[in-house]
Amino acid sequence: MDMHTRHAHLFTNKTQRGILCIENLQDGTMHLMTSENLAKDIQSTRFLLDLGTFEHKDLQDAYERIGLEAFSIKVLVTAKDEENLATLLAVQEKRLMAQGKSLY
């Protein structure tokens, strides 16, 4: 799979909205967040984690303890223009918890 296919949201002029997932690859714990601009928020999330200023303390502590290589920041769901992001977030959190996933 090439870069343009795998990360299509980074190579478009249209702003895409949806749900981002930051996953701890060591223990599978996830943090979900809404985004009005997926490409921008992937970059800014990584920047904030690297700076040590991400808003979620437990996630930030884990990031500092185990490092960048143990985390994945990805688009979980791309939303349609009319979809409510808060509702979409709640649905995704419920789905992951039903699968036994841990959330930050």
Image: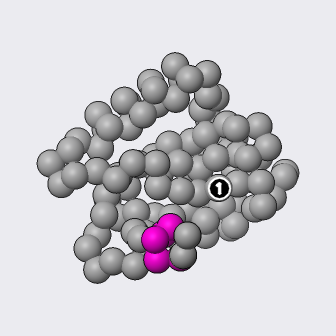
User: In screen coordinates, is 30 left or right of 52?
Assistant: left
Q: Residue at x 15, y 48 (%)?
A: 82
Image vertical order of residue 64 relative to residue 30, above or below? below
Q: Residue at x 39, y 48 (%)?
A: 77
The residue singled out by tag 1 in the image is 72
> Relative to the observer, which residue lies in front, 3 or 49?
3
Whether 4 is among the magenta residues is yes
Among the 4 quarters of the image, the one containing residue 29 = top right
Among the 4 quarters of the image, the one containing residue 11 = bottom left
Q: Position of residue 13 (x, y in %)?
A: 28, 80
* Magenta region, main secondary structure: helix
Is residue 54 visible to us here?
A: no
- Toward the right, the furthest residue is 65
- Toward the left, the furthest residue is 82
Q: Position of residue 45 (x, y in %)?
A: 55, 62
Assign the C terminus to one quadrant of the image: top right
User: In screen coordinates, is 27 left or right of 51?
Assistant: right
Image vertical order of residue 51 relative to residue 95, above or below? below
Image vertical order of residue 88 relative to residue 19, above or below? above
Q: Residue at x 33, y 77 (%)?
A: 12
User: In screen coordinates, is 44 left or right of 11?
Assistant: right
Mark 1: amino acid = Ser
Q: Position of residue 83 (x, y in %)?
A: 20, 44
> Relative to the observer, which residue lies in front, 2 or 13?
2
Q: Position of residue 41 (x, y in %)?
A: 46, 64
- What's the magenta region? 3-7
Q: Residue at x 64, y 29 (%)?
A: 102
Is residue 50 visible to us here?
A: yes
